[in-house]
Amino acid sequence: MKKTDWYKDAIIYQIYPRSFCDSNGDGLGDIPGIISKLDYLKGLGVNCVWLSPVYDSPQEDNGYDISNYKDIYKPFGTLDDFKVMLNEMHKRGIRLIMDLVVNHTSSEHPWFKSAISDKNSPYRDYYIIKKGKKNGKKPPNNWSGFFAEKAWEKIDDEYYYLHLFAKGQPDLNWENPKVREEVKDILRFWLDMGVDGFRCDVITLISKDQRFKSVFPTLAIAGKQYYVNGPRLHEYLHELNKDVLSNYDCMTVGETVLSSLDDAKLLIQPEREELSMVFNFDHTDTDNFFGAKWFYREFKLTRLKKVVDRWQHGLFNCGWNSLFIENHDQRRCIGRFGTNDKELRYESATMLGATYFMLQGTPFIYQGQEIGMTNGDFTEMADLRDVEVKNTYKLAEKLFFLKPLIKKHMFSLTRDNARTPFQWNNQEFAGFSSVEPWIRVNANKEFINAEQDLKNEKSINKFYRQLIEFRKNNEVIKNGAYTCLNKNNNDVYAYKRKLDDKEVVVISNFKNKIVKEKLIDELSNYKLVISNYSNKSNELQPYETRVYINY
Ligand code: TEU
């Protein structure tokens, strides 16, 4: 097997299976539904899919809680359906990467059930189980997790288990070599079947500082200094790479929450043989304080530029970037980053699309992003489904904030915003399903849907096709050096990519106003290849974007 860098030429489409396409009328998306849409994906031009978890699971966190790593969640289909899907993807030149969720399992996993029901179980040491303090009355330490809860849950009078996410997601004990062998076995199972790689869920959390020290003060995600980028992280990843990943032509992209550029370099420098790429969240944190999305603050373009500059320069000739503006944990990009989700939706969507697509790295598109889907139109807490927002709401209520205010906050920031059913057409359930889906369809499916978008003169999908087409085999986009052309400008983002004497220049207006841009005068010998207005003057229209080349 020859290991290649195919992921550097990939354009990856993320499918959140529950919400993509329901083929059998149970209100939940499924694998046959995905198969029925592969020609649509082929038409868009993507050449790889990242599939959010489809494994067997009680779905406390929509599949990020796995109870059997080698089987499919029944309502999504069977292993045979999966194999057909994989084959149909490969036939169309589309690779498939799976979601690898191995920081934790589900509490319904047989390993965990055995571990907590019997102190002598061979699986006891698969998890992080510790005696409580004060004769079991208090947890082993004061850590808290990501979902607005304490990180320890009682098993009996004496013992607790660690869960950095929901209670139904107990953390695995990676110190135990048997656990690492199990993970390798899971990797081989899917790689041997033909999958092309993995998106590794919260991979930077797998190694915990074994002193399990309490921390002070105890803010949100208390203890993170002891469990993010822990002491043996690199050793574990190198081991997986050496023993399994290096034997296949596969790629990995690590979800690296709370990690810096320096942390990322250690994970992806090719000679270290750990991961291929990471997802960093510095850009999605440009509209909050402390990297915590609930602490919302107004977006500022210069802040975004700083982040992009840091990563584009930081990984140049040293690692490989991933590029994304949406995923299943983020709210929709339109209406975000200073843009407008109403009358200038097309302009906003296309401007953001062009701006991130011309950077160095592998672009990811989240389902619905390519037709400009917007946040959910939630009005009641009962409209929401996500365990994170439910826990956070409970906590906020306890801290006696004004209820109507927190509700509004929850509606605008909940992860459910990205999880509403894909809007295929304007039928009652948006062509997603024939029955009421698991989460409400956005009422704007009347005019925001794939069928309509493809008919529109201003089609977001067609704009993305253009971006994808332009990137394919484009050496300047793949390898060119990045330079920001107007660091201190808070309205317009202009940057250049340069390889030898070939240049690509991107100019994007992030404001809902007309902006005069002098740079345009200097580009009179360049060719305008992509834009979302037919304007050629040096005044940029609201959310106008232009891509120029000099070759
Ligand atoms: O996300 C990790 C993670 O850190 C997020 O939960 C993040 O804190 C949150 O989205 C901020 O709003 C991964 C998965 O992408 C997510 O869907 C899972 O819930 C989580 O891991 C647990 O597996």
Image: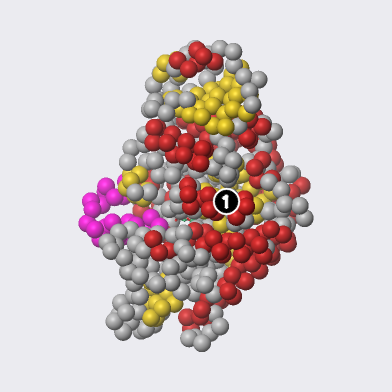
Residue type pointed to by label 1: Ile
Pinpoint residue 499: horizontal percent, then vertical percent.
62, 28
The stretch drawn in magenta includes residue 394? yes
* In the foreground, 232 or 398: 232
Q: Is mark 1 on a helix, strand or loop?
A: helix
Pinpoint residue 509: horizontal percent, then vertical percent.
45, 25
Identify the residue at horizontal 59%, vertical 13% (top origin). Answer: 525
Colour scheme of this structure image? secondary structure
Identify the residue at horizontal 53%, vertical 70% (top origin). Answer: 174
The quadrant in which residue 300 appears is top left
* In the foreground, 179 or 299: 179
Pinpoint residue 528: horizontal percent, then vertical percent.
59, 18
In the rendered image, the quadrant that contains the N terminus is bottom right
* In the foreground, 117 or 1: 1
Can residue 474 be seen by looking at this rendering?
yes
Pinpoint residue 386: horizontal percent, then vertical percent.
43, 56
Q: Is mark 1 within 8 Å of ligand 1?
A: no
The stretch drawn in magenta includes residue 25? no
The residue segment tinted magenta is 388-410
The quadrant in which residue 296 appears is top left
What residue does disc 1 label? Answer: 268
